[in-house]
Every structure is written in structure tokens, then in C-alpha cells.
Image (spheres, rainbow, N blue to C red):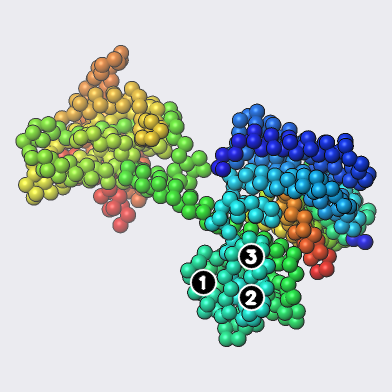
Amino acid sequence: MTRILLVEDNEMNRDMLTRRLERKGFTIEAAGDGEEALKKIAASQPDLVLMDMNLPILNGWATCRELRANPATESLPIIALTAHAMAEDEQKARAAGCNDYTTKPIDFPLLLAKIDNLLTA
Amino acid sequence: MSNVVPTRELVRLQGLQVKVGQLLVKNKLSDMLKDDLSRLYEALELSVAKLDDLNLQGVPLDSIDSAEMRHDIRNAIGITKGYAELIKDTAEAPSATLSNLLDKIMLWSAKTISTLERTRRKQTDSSLFAMTAIKQQHPDHRGHILILDDEPANRELLSRHIQQLGLETFACATADEAYEVLRSNDIDLILLDLIMPGVSGHQVLADLKASQLWRAIPVIVISGMSDQDEVIKCIQAGADDYLQKPFNKVLLQARLHAGLDRKRWVDKERDLSNELEKSHRFIKNTFGRYLSTEIVSKLLDKPDGLDMGGQLQTVSILMADIRGFTTISESLPPQKVVKVLNNYLGTMADIIMAHDGTVDEFIGDAILALFGAPVAKADDSDRAIACALAMQAEMDAINERNIAEGLPSIRIGIGINTGEVVAGNIGSKKRAKYGVVGHAVNVTSRVEDQTQPGEILVAQSTLDHCSLSLQTGRELRLQPKGVKETISVTAINGIDSHVSNGDDSKNDSKNNAKNDAEHIKSNDTVSNDTRSNNKLANE
């Protein structure tokens, strides 16, 4: 059972993605901001993190950098969910340590391929 | 098509929302479906609310300036689309009505998002729906994919898959064929087989990445299971991604999208830098003739560059004209008058620019030059005076040329005044011109009116700002029209010292009071050419 932590502050987005991923057989845990994400990752050690970048309290980029700085999570697969297909957004996400990124609105088959790609790598 | 009125989108969406509501009430549904549908209903409600906001503001969907508003709408529609896809994927035995409704919602979402993104077409998201919508709206906007693979079966399979995605393919069996295609087509992405007879995939990759023209085209390397090391080598050599045989359709799709996205950014960056260059060229063309290179580059360096909407600024204004020009022009054929003027004005413009002045206007034989606009400097007055002296000094050379060409010799008068003016782009939107308006301009004109041939008259306002030690001549008081107080004006014959330490003479005069008689001549032939002084000092 693959466990994914979904970090997303928008309730509707979180609910929609949770439902879609759960029906594909993933176990989803959700967090609404970067700080909550760090706590939940430490507590439950998910297999992969899907993270919106514009988060309250601690944003996605900062959260990513913290995860990469910690030896326990330095290789945890992270997929960034960014608002738009901007080159700088991808570069920023990759620079912060994200393994991959996908833009919103989410192309679900593409997201699944990316998850699969990271988990089997 | 280009201006979608939100009302139409909104009405359509409200219709869809009502239908989802009806389904929820009327039909017997499984708990899961009922729950999913009620979430979809909420998402539709959110989208309606966002579009309604937009509608109230009268903003068309494809011209929303606010990134935040665009983000909110994109988000609402994205959620709507997500729930619709979820239900479509997971509902057990959906009714035809439901299935149809979900299709409509997904189509509406894809269309609306692509309209929303049209303002930033180059940054379109990678969703397949949006891609399809783009393809329908912009037939020429298809991605062009080059496939280089020596195996016919592979070429065939890849081409078919890729064409299904709405992209155009160019299949090549050899490197030479591929180069031919690259030369005559605008290719967005290359799928490259590694193992080929003749030129290897590595060599092709190296050639592509060495080419100025083709370097930016993303390359996805195709490889068999066994050559992992090769793939790593290729990525290091500049390939963007790789695909393993046998192809996974979803992965192929995902990587193509990622590659095309990258290409779009590169194109966008190139467009932006071209635009930037264009606007720089525009500034240079518009102002280059009148402004010194230093000022032009200063304008270009400023982030708000051309914000010259009007500013109150203290400037030193220089006006010069040919004394007795009306008489000269009456006695000469028009072609010769133009020749006299061009000889004179061209040289003067050069001198003004060499002193970092701005030639604001040529009015017949008169020159209006500014020191301190558009860019103010501490030594504006000093440079204006030095410039006037250089202009008078140059007259000998101009006259020599005139006489050699059978033209009359001319003498000019120069007036300088310093004061506050409004500087900015003045005129209508279509025909704006950088210039100054204000009382100080009129006063300068009055000062200049008083000059004798060969003379420079400088108003006290300029002398007050001047740090030069000057050789002065006559002094007079003027009472220009509409001015209560009189203006005191002094004739300037030269600068009292010249360079001793390599600096401009104008900056150095206070420290160096040594009188250099060689550089001061009579009233008529002022000859303290600061440019030649600089030259001496630099040597």
C-alpha cells in the first residue's frame, strides 16, 4: 500500500485529489500547510509527498528545503503542484529539491505516471 | 472567438450546475456517487461565483490582468474538472444522462481554461484537454515532433501514438534526413533512437547541442532496456529525457508534454528577449539622434525606463541661432540654405551630445538644447556653458567649409538660462515628443534675442549653479515680457583655467585659477574648446 501525503491548503482541491488518488488504491494523508506537513512526515513517514507550493505558514519551497536538509527525508520523493507552467516555477521547485512537478489544473493520468515513475525509480 | 464574454460561459455553466442538482434530487444513487456528485455541485457553485464576480467587473475571460483572479478561477474550474473526471472514472454503471453531463462539464472546463490561458498562450498548462482545445483553436499551433529511428516498425508505432495526441510527426530513418527536416521545419521536440547504423544517436545529439539553431530543441532519447549507461551519457550530453522500449503510452505522453512545455518556455524567453531588444532599438532610434549614448543607456538601464510622463525639473536651457539668418536665406537659393543649415546643425548636434546635452528641437536655424533632462546631473550648468563655448569655437571651421563650398559665412548667438520646467513626453498619444515647457524656456529665448553675433549670454540663474571660473564680458539687465523682476545677464568669453589633472576643465576650474591666456581670445572668437582641452589632458 503506497502512502502519499497530500499538502494542499484549499479544502476542495484537497478533497478532490484525495478521492481520486484513494480510488486508485493509494492511502492518502493530508496536511494544510508546510508546518503540518513536516510534523506528519516525521510521524508517519509516507512513501511520497504531493505538495502545493503556495502554502500558508511555511510555503512549499521552504518546506522542501527543510525536508532535503534532514537526513531522514533527504531522498523522500516530492512532486510539486504549481499554479502555472512557468519555467521559473519549475526551476524554483527543482532548486528547492522537488523530484518532479506538475501544473494545475492537474492532468490526472500525467500525475499518476509521475508518481509511478518516482516510486519505481 | 478572441473575446469570450463571461456571460455566455456563465450561463452555460449555470445550466450544467442545475442539471447536476436535478440528478442529485431525482435519482436513486449509491452513497459514494451521491457524495461525489454533491462535491461536484459545490465545485460548480464555486466556479459560477468566480465567473459571476468577473462578469460584474465586465472583464472578459481572456484578458484578466490580476494574476490572483486568474488563479482563483483556474483553481475553481480545476476542482470542477477534477470531480467530473473522478465520477466519470469511478461511477459504476453511470446513466447515459450522467455520462453525457460529465462529458459536457469536462469539455466546458477544458475550453474555459484554455480561454483563460489564452492571454498567456505560451504558458499553457500541460493538460491534454487544454492541448486539444488549443489545437482546435489554433490549427497552426500544433507541436512538431521529429522521430529519428532506423527501425520502420518503431517509427510507425511512435508516429501513430503521437499523432493521436494531436501532434504532427516527421519520421526520419537517417541522421541526414533528420537534418533536412530540421532545416526546413520548425521542430518543437526530437525523439532520438540511440542505436542506429551509420551516424550514431550520440553523434546526432552532439551535433544538435553544438548547433546554435537547434540547441534549444528538447531531445528525448529512446533506448533499449540494456543501455542504461548509454542513457546516462546522453542526459549528460544534453538530452532532456529518455524513453525505454517497449514504449509505455502514458509515459510517452507525459514526457512529450514536459518536453513541449520546455520548448514553449524557451520560445517565450526568446520572444521576450526579442521584445526587449525591439524596445531598446525603438528607444535608440527615437532618442539616439538627439541624446548622447550615455543618456540613452541610462534610460535603458532604468527599470521604469521611459516613464517620462512629466516631471518638474531644473534644467539649463541653451538656445542658439544664426544671427541675420533671414537676410542670408533671402539672398540664397533654397538648396544652398538647406546646405548651410545642415553643415551647421549637424556639427552643433554633435557638440551638444558630446557635452551630454539633449537636442530638444531644431526650429529653422535655431537650436533648443537641454542640460539636465531627461537625466539631471550636478554639472548641468557647467556643461551648458562649456558646450556654448565649444559651439562658438567650432564656427571658424564651419565657416571655412562654407566658404570652400561657395556658401556665406555665418555667426551665431547663444543664450543660456536655468530654471524649473516640466519635462516629459508632450503631445498626443500618437505623436508624442520629449520636450520641456515652462517660463524658463521663454526667458532663454529673450536672453538669446539680446546676443550679438559670436556672443554667449548667460543668465544669472545659470551662473548661480555654475562652478566654473569664467571670463566674463558685458553685463546687462533684461526685463522680459510678463516678468516683474529684471534678469541680469553676463557675456561669457571663456573658462578661466584649463585642465591640469586629467579631469574635465569644467570640474577643475576652482582649484586651478591659473589664467591661461592662450585660450582666451576676443569677444568674437571665443576659443576655449573644452574638447580639445580634454584631448590634450588625456594625452
Q: Which mark is residue B163?
A: 3
Q: Circle 1 — which element?
A: helix
Q: Which residue is mark 2?
A: B155
Q: Which residue is mark 1?
A: B181
Residue appearing at x 66%, y 38% in the figure? B9
Relative placement, left or right, of B285 versus A98 is left
Q: Evaluate whether label 3 is on the same chain as label 1.
A: yes
Position in image of residue B202 (x %, y %):
61, 79
- Is residue A60 something that shows in the picture? no
Position in image of residue B26 (x %, y %):
88, 37
Earlier sequence position, callout 2 versus callout 3: 2
Residue A93 falls in image quadrant: bottom right
Residue appearing at x 50%, y 40% in the figure? B304
Question: What is the spatial separation of the Cα atoms under label 2 and label 1, in whole angstroms?
Answer: 15 Å
Relative placement, left or right, of B515 versus B30 is left
Residue appearing at x 56%, y 43% in the figure? B1
Q: Nearer the viewer, residue B12 or A26?
A: B12
Earlier sequence position, callout 2 versus callout 1: 2
Question: What is the spatial separation of the Cα atoms under label 3 and label 1, in whole angstroms?
Answer: 17 Å
Residue type beneath disc 2: Arg
Residues under numbered marks 3 and 1 in contact, where contact means CB atoms less than 8 Å apart: no
Q: Evaluate whether label 2 is on the same chain as label 1.
A: yes
